[in-house]
Amino acid sequence: MEICSRCEKIRELKHGSGLCASCYVRAHYRTGICTTCKQEKPIHSKGVCQRCLDRSPEKKARKNELRRKAYAENAESRERAKVSRRLSYAKAGLNTARKRNRFHMYGLTPEGFQALFAAQDFSCAVCRRILDEDAPKKYHRPHVDHCHTSGQARQILCGYCNFVLGGSFENSDVLRALAAYVDVWHKTLR
């Protein structure tokens, strides 16, 4: 607690400026329309309200840098972050790694995934093999097929079909050549 240089009251000073919080706002802000959110509020000298100023890319980058530093240097901070992540995942119903990955990579919530899976009769969209999320082999579990350029989820495939599609780089000419190759060898060996 120190004496404010403007109102001369004993208060906690803000930002080492020699001003209390209310005098600081009066000195650095004016009422106007924020250039970012377009609302009439106390405006900072940069033309934005405090809320938009706090959301600026520079402010976010600085905040993230401080978080990363605290995370790297402090084991307690890392543990708090892990617990916080687990709680947020549990609250969102993303309690398994597979569900979290579907959500982060494709934006599919557990309900959205189940709806898509049910619409395909719980089977692969290509070979129609019945799939089980709890199958011991990963190729018998459902895999989300997605566009590699847009990241948009398409349909659910079995692991085998997903592997073939990915291995062909989603090139229909390669897939046709592969089918022709199989046909030739089936005829030759019969």
Image: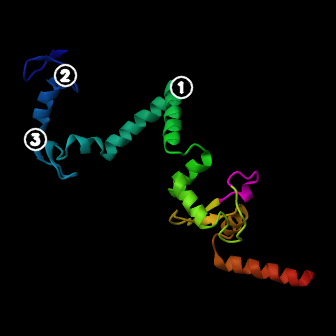
Q: How is the image coloured?
A: rainbow
Q: Which residue is mark 2?
A: 13
Quarter-wise, where is residue 50 in the image? top left
Q: Residue 76: give x, y in percent of width and height.
A: 51, 24
Residue 141 in magenta? yes
Q: Residue 31: give x, y in percent of width and height.
A: 10, 43
| Viewer can see residue 98 | yes
Q: Looking at numbered disc 1 in the image, what kind of residue is underneath it?
A: Ala
Q: Residue 176: give x, y in percent of width and height.
A: 71, 80
Quadrant where the C terminus lies? bottom right
**First in residue order: circle 3 vs circle 1:** 3
Q: Nearer the viewer, residue 184 or 156?
A: 156
Q: Nearer the viewer, residue 182 or 99?
A: 99
Check disc 1: other Cα within 10 Å, few if <14, some if 14-19, many if 20+. few
Q: Looking at numbered disc 2 in the image, what kind of residue is underneath it?
A: Leu
Q: Which residue is mark 1?
A: 75
Q: Which mark is residue 156?
A: none
| Viewer can see residue 72 | no
Q: Looking at numbered disc 3 in the image, what kind of residue is underneath it?
A: Arg
At 20% from the left and 15% from the top, the residue drawn is 1
Tell me if 102 is positioned left or right of 65 in this view.
Answer: right
Range covered by the magenta-colored residues: 133-142
Quarter-wise, where is residue 161 in the image? bottom right
Q: Which residue is mark 3?
A: 30
How far separated are the C-alphas under marks 2 and 1? Answer: 33 Å
